[in-house]
Image (tube, rainbow, N blue to C red):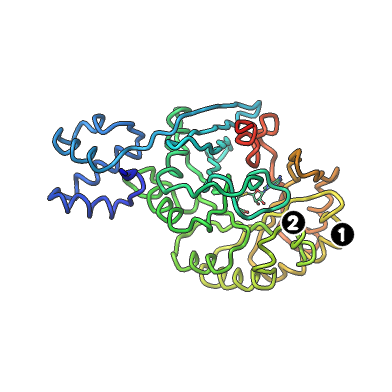
């Protein structure tokens, strides 16, 4: 079976070109074309016909199909992409004052089993490859005719459960010959796979690490996030303190507010205790009411935020973009599969 040429990093592509007695600058030209969104080798006009033929014999160029596109009142765009193997993934593009941000998927489905999340309902079908992760931004950007400057790995899947492909993707998307995104404009969100957090720390990539905490005690976190039974809050916080010491970068915590479960003053106090003295920020997200889960969002989200701020915790409430188009948490893919 042919390999998707976009799964290679520039270094790997250069190695391949060397192997077929081609100079490194040809690999660079080819890499540029791929990031620009060509759909066929014939579009690489500064590469000779013979060389294009060799490339086409060894590789294919992935071209996801836009299976559905929805635009919300606030200009949030949600894509349902169909991969070459017929699987579906979701990508959401949000427009902010500071730029355009894409929320990318890293897996088809997810194995983590968080109780409030729609993406995990059918389990994980497979990992996405580096090229397929990159394709979401390439083809969303091409469709919108606008540059996407920011990336959050907060779509379907657990990025650190697909470690190698995600690292390859990060290298390619930040490559100056490619989309040239700044590491500082990229966030990676994890449910807390401790050994992988420590691996990521050593990559020395100045991205923002977001951690889905969602509950301040093991007793509560165990109920909604099975991963906590493997890596509990103490293990998680220890690894995050190491991460902050090593990288000097603050951690962004995601805390989904669920009515009557984790939204009391007691919860806020425990959360503040956990984060005491740590370089951290809390992003509060009113739970997205997925039909299957039965969780409800609290009426008053700011109350919890203000409690945290009073206890010297840096906290903000995430703006809810695209709520009129189900632009959250695997809901569109689920509808398509039905
Ligand atoms: N697997 C990664 C990233 C994907 S989910 C992680 O767990 O962090 C991105 C964020 O959306 C996570 O914080 C996740 O917990 C949250 N999320 C998932 N379903 C949600 C829902 N129904 N309402 C609110 N947030 C949700």
Left or right position of 249 against 113:
left
Q: Residue at x 58, y 54 (%)?
A: 189
* Badge 2 element: helix
Between 93 and 124, the one nearer to me in the picture? 124
Left or right position of 90 against 288:
left
Say above or below: 68 vs 96: above
Say above or below: 248 vs 163: below
Position of the N terminus, as image quadrant, is top left
For label 1, the crowd category at 10 Å Cα-Cα, with few meaning under 14, some 14 to 19 and many 20 or more, is: few
Q: Position of residue 291 (x, y in %)?
A: 76, 38
Q: Quadrant of residue 190?
A: bottom right
Which tag, 1 or 2, sits closer to the chain's start? Answer: 2
For label 2, the crowd category at 10 Å Cα-Cα, with few meaning under 14, some 14 to 19 and many 20 or more, is: some
Q: Position of residue 37 (x, y in %)?
A: 36, 34
Label 1 sits on residue: 265
Marks 1/2: CA–CA distance: 19 Å
Q: Residue at x 50, y 67 (%)?
A: 201
Left or right position of 283 against 134:
right
Q: Position of residue 173 (x, y in %)?
A: 41, 47
Label 2 sits on residue: 224
Say above or below: 7 vs 51: below
Q: Which is more foreground, mark 1 or mark 2?
A: 2
* Badge 1 element: helix
Between 182 and 123, the one nearer to me in the picture? 123
Q: Quadrant of residue 279?
A: bottom right
Between 290 and 102, the one nearer to me in the picture? 290
Position of the C terminus, as image quadrant, is top right
Q: Quadrant of residue 29?
A: top left
Q: Residue at x 54, y 52 (%)?
A: 187
Left or right position of 219 against 103:
right
């Amino acid at each position: 079976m042919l390999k998707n040429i976009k799964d290679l990093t520039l270094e790997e592509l250069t190695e391949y070109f060397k192997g077929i007695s081609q100079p490194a600058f040809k690999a660079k030209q080819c890499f540029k074309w791929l990031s620009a969104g060509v759909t066929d080798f014939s579009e690489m006009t500064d590469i000779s016909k013979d060389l294009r033929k060799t490339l086409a014999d060894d590789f294919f160029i992935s071209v996801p199909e836009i299976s559905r596109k929805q635009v919300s009142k606030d200009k949030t765009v949600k894509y349902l992409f169909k991969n070459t193997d017929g699987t579906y993934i979701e990508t959401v593009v949000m427009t902010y004052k500071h730029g355009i941000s894409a929320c990318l998927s890293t897996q088809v489905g997810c194995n983590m089993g968080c109780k409030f999340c729609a993406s995990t309902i059918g389990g994980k079908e497979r990992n996405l490859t580096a090229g397929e992760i990159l394709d979401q931004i390439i083809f969303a950007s091409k469709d919108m005719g606008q540059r996407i400057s920011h990336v959050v790995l907060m779509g379907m899947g657990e990025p650190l459960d697909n470690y190698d492909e995600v690292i390859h993707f990060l290298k390619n998307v930040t490559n100056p010959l490619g989309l040239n995104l700044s590491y500082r404009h990229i966030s990676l969100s994890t449910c807390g796979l401790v050994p992988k957090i420590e691996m990521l720390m050593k990559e020395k990539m100045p991205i923002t690490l977001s951690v889905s905490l969602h509950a301040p005690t093991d007793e509560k976190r165990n109920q909604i996030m099975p991963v906590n039974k493997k890596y509990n809050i103490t293990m998680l916080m220890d690894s995050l303190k190491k991460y902050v010491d090593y990288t000097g970068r603050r951690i962004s915590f995601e805390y989904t507010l669920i009515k009557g479960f984790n939204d009391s003053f007691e919860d806020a106090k425990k959360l503040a205790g956990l984060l005491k003295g740590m370089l951290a920020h809390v992003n509060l997200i009113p739970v997205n009411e997925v039909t299957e889960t039965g969780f409800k969002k609290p009426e008053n989200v700011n109350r919890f935020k203000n409690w945290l701020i009073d206890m010297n915790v840096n906290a903000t409430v995430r703006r809810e973009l695209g709520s009129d188009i189900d632009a959250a948490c695997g809901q569109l893919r689920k509808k398509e599969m039905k």
